[in-house]
Image (cartoon, rainbow, N blue to C red):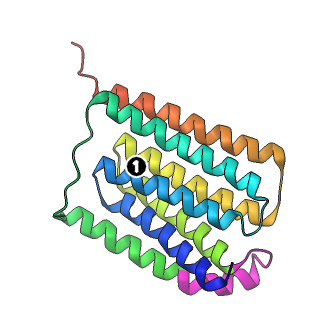
């Protein structure tokens, strides 16, 4: 896979993370999360066995499906809005996210030379971008679904970075278990949050 194609995948991945940071429309968020996992899979198979990448992809899609089915069961999914109106909060989060993506793009080449020489530039850009956007989401949004998506985004970036430097079957299994555990905990918190308070 050529470097230019990898960079297209990288920025598509970061765009999906940015959409989850900015928008608060759950159907859009679920689609963006699934596509984000797909882009991580495409980057992962550039340096790992495709069978391992498929396991990561399946775990990511299962995580998305668990969250999606939770939202469907609560009846909280709304139809897609094709005319977007952005609030001030969304504009602020969007600008902050774009600034961080630009900063990652500018500083990654030097960081790769000094700290991560074994990691390719596209993989390092994607992993650091996902980590930073995930942390940004955790710091800016308190709704349970978006906190879980922020954690999953952060974890995707960390897994990608760690996987590019070292391979451990035990840790890969642990990462898969943590992803599924986060999805289940997230589903529980979302359900509890939507339940009416008992007096």
Q: Residue at x 64, y 58 (%)?
A: 158
Q: Quadrant of the N terminus?
A: bottom right
Q: How many marks?
A: 1
Q: Nearer the viewer, residue 89 or 17?
A: 17
Dot 1, crowdedness within 10 Å: few (<14), some or many (≥20)?
A: many
**What percent of the width, then of the height, locates residue 45?**
71, 64
Q: Quadrant of residue 174?
A: top right
Label 1 residue SS: helix
Q: Is 149 on the left-hand or right-hand side of 172?
A: left
Give the main secondary structure of the magenta stretch: helix
* Pointer 1 residue: 30
Q: Quadrant of the C terminus?
A: top left
Give residue 171's position: percent from left, percent from top.
77, 46
The reply, left or right, for residue 52 in relation to residue 86 is right
Q: Which residues are magenta?
A: 105-120
- Residue 92 found in image quarter: bottom left
Residue 130 image position (x, y, % from top left): 54, 64
Foreground pick, 63 / 141: 63
Q: Position of residue 58 (x, y in %)?
A: 61, 45
Q: Is residue 87 left or right of residue 179?
A: left
Q: Residue at x 26, y 36 (%)?
A: 76
């Amino acid at each position: 896979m050529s470097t230019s194609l990898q960079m297209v995948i990288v920025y598509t991945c970061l765009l999906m993370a940015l959409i989850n940071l900015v928008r608060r429309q759950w159907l859009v968020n679920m689609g963006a999360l699934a596509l984000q996992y797909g882009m991580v899979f495409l980057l992962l198979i550039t340096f790992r066995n495709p069978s391992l990448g498929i396991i990561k992809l399946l775990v990511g899609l299962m995580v998305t499906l668990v969250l999606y089915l939770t939202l469907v069961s609560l009846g909280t999914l709304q139809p897609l809005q094709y005319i977007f109106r952005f609030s001030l909060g969304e504009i602020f989060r969007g600008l902050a996210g774009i600034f961080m993506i630009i900063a990652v793009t500018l500083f990654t080449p030097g960081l790769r030379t000094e700290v991560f020489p074994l990691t390719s530039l596209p993989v390092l850009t994607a992993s650091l971008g996902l980590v930073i956007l995930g942390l940004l989401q955790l710091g800016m949004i308190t709704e349970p679904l978006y906190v879980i998506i922020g954690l999953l985004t952060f974890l995707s970036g960390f897994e990608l970075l760690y996987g590019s430097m070292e391979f451990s079957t035990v840790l890969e299994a642990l990462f898969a278990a943590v992803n599924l555990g986060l999805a289940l905990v997230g589903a529980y918190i979302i359900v509890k949050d939507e339940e009416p308070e008992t007096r």
